[in-house]
Amino acid sequence: MINVKNLNKKYNQKTALCDFSFEIEQGRVLGLLGPNGSGKSTLMNILAGSLKQDDGNIYIDKRQIGEYTKSIVSYFPENNNLYRWMKVKDIEKFYDNLFYDFDKEKFILMKEKFGLKDNESIIDLSKGVLQKLRLGLVLSRRARVFLLDEPLGGIDTLSREQVMNTIFDCISEDVTIILATHLIDEVERLFDKVLFIKNGKVMLFEDCDTLRSENGSSIKSIYLEVMKND
Amino acid sequence: MNCDFDNNIPIYIQVVKWLENEIISSRLSPGDKLPSVRDLANQFQVNPNTIQRAYREIEQKGLCHTRRGMGSFVTDDKVKIKKLLDEFVSKEISDFTDKMSKMGLSDFDIKKAIEQYLNKGEIND
């Protein structure tokens, strides 16, 4: 479903992604794990079509990044991308107009679940509630690919399970998910595969249960081990 | 059941174990329909592909079979289930006796200790 080949990206002289390749089938959940500044968000941005690579090929559903891929990819960037002056109801309308696959009914349920009120202004929302609103919007699209960059960032421990459940409900054989997170132990059961990224390079790309059986340890311990070396 | 999975062990293997235990203990009887992949995934909060893999595994062991469009069912083959139970029992006993031997108990001591325990305990028949 997603095929990335020899991707390179530099910001001025600094390498963000270096000869980066991986492939993920439809219906899979990929955990993208790496320290700050490792290139996770750059990769997400390129896959979402909001940033251009220097060279290398990317295919999503066998098509190069463009209008079509953008129409099937729902992207949750790490930082707020909503206009602060908008109210919840405005942003709902905005999404409804912008994306033909926006499921309004689903979003209404999300609003209820997350306790979001139509007349609340985005500027007044706490960080956690804003995260929930953004995630609600992104997950309410009937998209085929979800790119979730730190969806649990800023979400307190009490709400985390609720947010996790919401993400969990989106997993299906028709949907491919890439999820970047620092909270490895809390999310690792959702992953089919993990990709460890460091300094813009793929350090490891493997099936989770294969890793657990070969190493006899959790993805988190393996991550700490792999990242410590080199 | 609220399953406390251990992230250090392949999740699908833990699901296989759980399913086998359900079958051994007759919480899932011969011919019973297994929970759907989705339901079990929801219950355990693990990736549905992991559950699918566990189902494939127990199907390969002949413990269940899939009917197209209807779901998976526990095998009717009671011999197979009996064999699974025997395997379970001998595994548990061998783990237990290994531990006891390591503590320096002889086979005789172990037998005596078990007898004493069973006679004193409520499982007395």
Image (cartoon, rainbow, N blue to C red):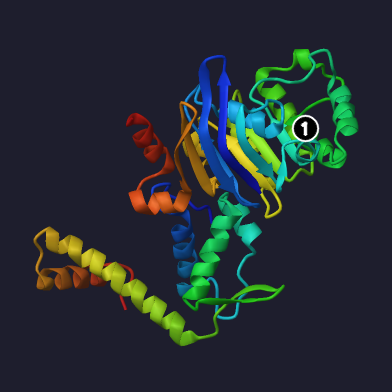
Residue B94: percent from the left, percent from the top? 24, 69
Residue A127: percent from the left, percent from the top? 66, 19
- Residue nearest the observer in this picture, A188 or A54: A54
**Residue drawn 88% across and 23% down?**
A90
Corner quadrant of residue A126: top right
Q: Is residue A161 visible?
A: no
Q: Amino acid at mark 1?
A: Leu
Quarter of the image that includes the C terminus of chain B = bottom left
Q: Is residue A154 left or right of residue A107?
A: left
**Residue drawn 45% across and 74% down?**
B24
Residue A173 vs A102, above or below: the answer is below
Mark 1, secondary structure of its residue: helix
- Residue nearest the observer in this picture, A166 or A142: A142
**Residue drawn 44% across and 60% down?**
B13
Q: Is residue A121 left or right of residue B9?
A: right
**Residue drawn 51% across and 17% down?**
A14
Quarter of the image that includes the N terminus of chain B = bottom right
Corner quadrant of residue A11: top right
The residue labelled by disc 1 is: A137
Residue B89: percent from the left, percent from the top? 33, 73
- Residue nearest the observer in this picture, A46 or B39: A46
Q: Is residue A128 visible?
A: yes
Q: Chain of mark 1?
A: A
Residue B23: percent from the left, percent from the top? 49, 73
